[in-house]
Image (cartoon, coloured by chain):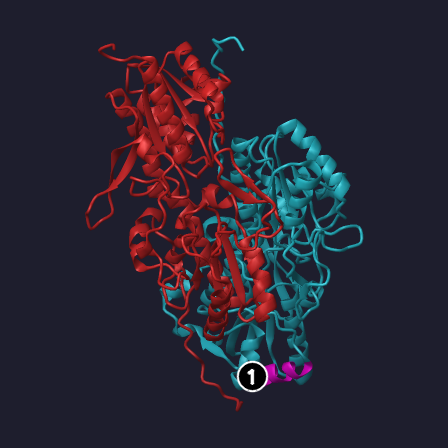
Chain colours: A red, B cyan
Amino acid sequence: MTDRLTGTLLIGQSGGPTAVINASLMGAVQEAAKHEEIEQVYGMLHGIEGVINETLIDLRRERQETIQGLLTAPSSALGSCRHKVTDADYEQILRVFKAHNVRFFAYIGGNDSMDTAARISKIAAHDGYELRVMGIPKTIDNDLDLTDHTPGYGSAARFIAQSTMDVGRDLEAMRPFDNVIIMETLGRHAGWLPAAAALAKTRPEEAPHLVYVPERAFDEEEFLQDVAALYKELGCVFVVVPAFLKDAQGDIVGADKSNVVKDAFGHTLMSQSSSTPATYLRGLVAKRLGLKARVMLPGLIGRDASSCVSPIDRAEAYVVGQMAVRQATQGTSGHMVTLVREPDAVYRCTTGLAPLEAVANAEKLLPAEFINDRGNGITQAYCDYARPLLGALPVHTRLERYPVATRLSV
Amino acid sequence: MTDRLTGTLLIGQSGGPTAVINASLMGAVQEAAKHEEIEQVYGMLHGIEGVINETLIDLRRERQETIQGLLTAPSSALGSCRHKVTDADYEQILRVFKAHNVRFFAYIGGNDSMDTAARISKIAAHDGYELRVMGIPKTIDNDLDLTDHTPGYGSAARFIAQSTMDVGRDLEAMRPFDNVIIMETLGRHAGWLPAAAALAKTRPEEAPHLVYVPERAFDEEEFLQDVAALYKELGCVFVVVPAFLKDAQGDIVGADKSNVVKDAFGHTLMSQSSSTPATYLRGLVAKRLGLKARVMLPGLIGRDASSCVSPIDRAEAYVVGQMAVRQATQGTSGHMVTLVREPDAVYRCTTGLAPLEAVANAEKLLPAEFINDRGNGITQAYCDYARPLLGALPVHTRLERYPVATRLSV
């Protein structure tokens, strides 16, 4: 072991992009400039594939304005991947690291990426190659364990909340022409994204009216009862469902079971069938209740919307990138930077550390106290947790509607 | 005829909401405060239905902050409708107008609403009841004739362009995991909304790669050829289609023809079938080309997104509301306020007037010179026309990606 480790910093981005993942890259690159022991700053193109294929780029040659521009550019500027790393790949990765004297490795990603980083750390140690490996958390799904929340979530949640707020007003205005709106969010097994719709509501009668999460089995008959009752009361119903809405058997509601795409990690990614939970439920509502329903599937807009970024999310994404590099230069390795909420009255987060292996392949689901008893709504406890992460939401004015006395007999 | 007409101003909103229709309401209400001859300012709840049912509200009793808040609140604050007015309705409308001494009538809407306003004007004249009727243009579809463009379009177009820009970067980053993205826009028979995606492109290889409009018959085989060729060249394909993508027979592509919903005007509004053009084409791309495709159906988010409003669109929406009331007090009637583009190098619009009847039930389609020869893309002429309407779009940084020399033999 050298007294002071010097060498190349290699940075990569992995998994699904977010609206703020490039802010983490910027934080890492700008922090690296402050440390003499970092001799080169390289980026890997398309995540770990860029290491395996030795397609690296020199980030120090980029113009300052380009690096500054990362703060507001959505998606992964280095390219991403969903590559399941094999044993042979790990040997190649170590060869590439040695060839470029990579001594600091920062990987921006979710739980699968933390697993990859943990294995690289272990293999390097086994080989006696000194390497500082740091994870930088990123996922719109907010399903990483051991961190209060994950950069990327606040902005994706803001898109859901603001869309619910905006279109909720549309549904009110068009009542009774449109009866039901069903919005489907991204997300895998955790319900953090559909839950965010709850932050749109400022009055009991406002959207959303029904919110479902993958943590609870979906019951079609209860759903139809609830839609019918809400329609009778309010004249319109705004429903939010996750792409992974599951029935009591664990199957995705409305999906053609023969036609599901899984990634290299075995995660179901999407159904290629023409039906999704939202389109299926639209048909159900039309057929069983005779109501007109519209579907909204914003899809990837929900993770990339540059118009809808949470300022706090962007700032935190920058800080976790920055801290990962700072920690690595201070000797930390094998950890992911976490966000730690201070118990202050005013929201404030500092950073902490969690072992990569503890984060890898874990999945933080929505806790039971964030879901209502009937499994069709989100609690105040969730709203208290999540509200600060989105930044200040707009406040849409509402006319008081002072009635003019009628002058004609009805 | 009195020398100087005095009485109530009645304002209503009709048809599909937009992100800036309330700015027009605000403009009308604030202008009315400047004119002594306007004795009351009433709003009609849910468009013409509010007149028929005599559900009027007193807008002068609203707080100033509430009226100011209309500038940024999406959707129709007065409520909207899609009511086809009958002869009996018109008699009732005139009774209500007389009962409340309505002498100024401003209707914010699209071509159907201009038709309603034109008929009210005619019936009042026939009855000898002095009434000044003004139309205030509104539609995300940009299909109103005799105006350079329509308030509401710039913001809806901005949402499409910015979403294409954002998700285009996502598709690049995830290549080759995601192969094809198919985004479906709102809109009826005119292709102004899908065309707006073209404004996202700053380099030839960037999204969108294929843009289809309802003005051209869609050919599945040509589409598949184009997707296959672009995928071979770029590794990913971003496709934009309208909800009303039509084949050579005039049928909506992929729709279950037995299950289509029409409004009271006979316009096809949506298909209740689980398949839409985008979901149908996803299946086609998967089946015929073996490519993984994702669908995005932002739906009503595309007309209400408060995060994505064009500043110029908002300002123009305010001005047309203001001018309608000013013109009415000056004696104009039976006209819609139009936007007139000045032939300056820098974009600038003034307002003009068009007869309600000339606007009513007309539909301005995308001119042939805005669509490329193959019918799968949008021309520079469109971009020159539309770019100023969206406001300045964000510029997303792009790494130069200076390669690091490889050190391992391949």
Q: Report the residue marked by disc 1.
A: B96
Frontmost residue, B104 versus A99 = A99
Question: Tag count in the figure?
Answer: 1
Give the residue furthest to the bottom. Answer: A409
Q: Can you see residue B196?
A: yes
Q: Residues within 10 Å of mark 1 (few under 14, many from 20)?
A: many
Asked whether residue A172 appears in the rendered view, the answer is no
Q: Please name whichever residue, A172 or B23, is drawn nearer the observer in this view of the structure.
A: A172
On what subunit does the disc labeled 1 rest?
Answer: B
Q: x%, y% of residue B217?
A: 77, 48
Residue B332 location, x and y as percent? 61, 69
Q: Is residue A51 magenta?
A: no
In the rendered view, tell whether residue B399 sits above or below residue A263: above
Looking at the rendered image, the quarter that the N terminus of chain B falls into is bottom right
Residue drawn at point x = 46 percent, y = 76 percent: B57
Residue lying farthest to the right in this orientation: B249
Q: Quick one: A5 or A246, which is closer to the camera?
A: A246
Taking the view exactly as shown, the residue that stands out farthest to the left is A344
Q: Provide residue A346's location: percent of width, then percent of height.
A: 22, 49
Residue B339, x across and y down, in percent? 60, 55
**In the depicted view, which residue is nearer to us: A197 or A109?**
A109
Q: Using residue A202 as the reference point, say whether residue B259 is left or right of it.
A: right
Q: Quadrant of the C terminus of chain B?
A: top right
Which contiguous range is marked in magenta?
A: B87-98
Q: Amino acid at mark 1?
A: Val
**Residue B294 in the figure: left or right of residue A375:** right
Give left or right: position of B365 versus B54.
right
SS assignment for the magenta stretch, majority: helix
Looking at the picture, does residue A26 appear above or below residue B120? above
In reply to whether residue B94 is colored magenta, the answer given is: yes
Please tell me whether mark 1 sits on a helix, a strand or a loop.
Answer: helix
Q: Residue furthest front?
A: A249
